[in-house]
Image (cartoon, grey):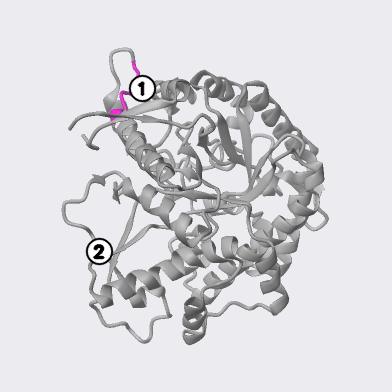
Amino acid sequence: MARQTWKIPADFILGAAASAWQTEGWAGKRPTQDSYLDMWYKNDPHVWHNGYGPAVATDFYNRYKEDIHHMKEIGLTHYRTSINWSRFLIDYETAEVDEVYAGYIDDVINELIASGVEPMICLEHYEIPAVLMEKYGGWGSKHVIDLFAAYAKKVFERYGDRVKYWFTFNEPIVPQTRIFLDAIRYPYEQNTKKWMQWNFNKALATAKCVRLFHARKSDCLEGAKIGVILNPEVTYARSSAPHDQKAARIYDLFFNRVFLDPSIKGAYPDELIELLVKHDILFDHDEAELDIIKQHTVDFAGINLYYPRRVKAPSRQWNDSTPFHPAYYYEYFELPGRKMNPFRGWEIYPQIVYDMAMRLKHEYGNIEWLIAENGMGVEHEERFKNEEGVIQDDYRIDFISAHLREAMKGIADGANCKGYMLWAFTDNVSPMNAFKNRYGLVEIRLEDNRSRALKKSACFYRDIIKNRQFETEEFRYK
């Protein structure tokens, strides 16, 4: 297949992403500042691959200058990370700031700016303080929403003069889906009602932070904006048959529109509300809270895209003694002949980027958005080192190129896509998988005191950032 050259708009963001908990480590952390992830790791270290967890992570806390040097070397236009809520405060009730950790964030932001890399900051990337989980039940509590808003206010006041792009949450649906819907993460409680309450409370928390941010916008950088990073799974029905189309529509309601609609449109889909009532899992709320969501929608959206979700109508009979789960309405479907990343078990289908771009254009007012995460995790990458010890990750180069191609197609067809953030800048810890699957442009060599080394993909990324163009051909996986 002939290669094709794609031009990248001059103002298109080409950056990379990570989170605080997956990179910083526990250096300097007070014993009272555990996050949910820290609590989970301390209770269940054996479920994390080879025992690696957030305790050391990539040691970014001590090595941020080294890593930012590599960001500058590659030429990243932006770097998106989070502030660890559990570490930013000493007292979560009074929002008393930990000046040591806050000073570290100051230093990171200043170092990024000095290196020509614009910071993007997320307020919560699964880092809810453990004590708020234990005391109030985490995001099931309306009080926690107010504590989060008080924390956000302190963050905006401190860094608003230097940070233009803000996000409330990264993938707000994920923790409660793993904890309460599928019961595969600590504390392993299957409770669909709690799942839905967490969903609502996080949507309300986003709206309250948007209101707070807009009220003080005159103190922010010009053009500053606030959004949320969602991970809608582009959903395809197995067939055009009505029963399969219904399965896809209901999956989309429960897992995609549950956040897309309140965050961007300011209201929940009627059909979703009807299903929540039918199955007795409607979230506790009042009209004033719905009005806050209606009046304070996000300025822009981050969308994490990794794989498609294919579903079909269920073929098995539901066990009436089993608590309600949205899977009552669907089963997963595996497309024959699909391209796969065998290490993650995820289908590779770059068209999800274009299809999401068109959906946001036609169904969500063509809101400004960016690909906030996209990447390819591969196990045992050391197999692909050349004689100089550089990982030859051509599979990652192909993956990035194919997804960027779909973004350029979307922009050509009128989508308001403003950027692409690779997951991740360096290899880092993931929940349970730890360092098993590597995503980074930069290798973390665990056996060599976590030393850093650029992969081939880092040089590729540097070149497309510099030249504002890239080439693609039919995607291949070796």
- Where is 76 relative to 160, above or below? above
Report x, y in % for residue 457: 37, 26
Q: How crowded is mark 1: few (under 14 residues within 10 Å), some or many (20 or more)?
A: some
Which residue matches tag 1?
A: 456
- Where is 89 relative to 401, above or below? below
Image quarter in which the C terminus is found: top left
Whether residue 217 sits left or right of residue 240 in the image: it is: right
Q: Which of marks 2 and 1 is nearer the N terminus?
A: 2
Helix, strand or loop under label 2: loop
Which span of residues is magenta-colored?
Answer: 389-394
Which residue matches tag 2?
A: 333
x 59%, y 61%: residue:
263
Report x, y in % for residue 128: 64, 54
Q: Which amino acid does label 2 sit on?
A: Phe
Report x, y in % for residue 78: 57, 32
Distance (Cα) linking label 2 and label 1: 35 Å
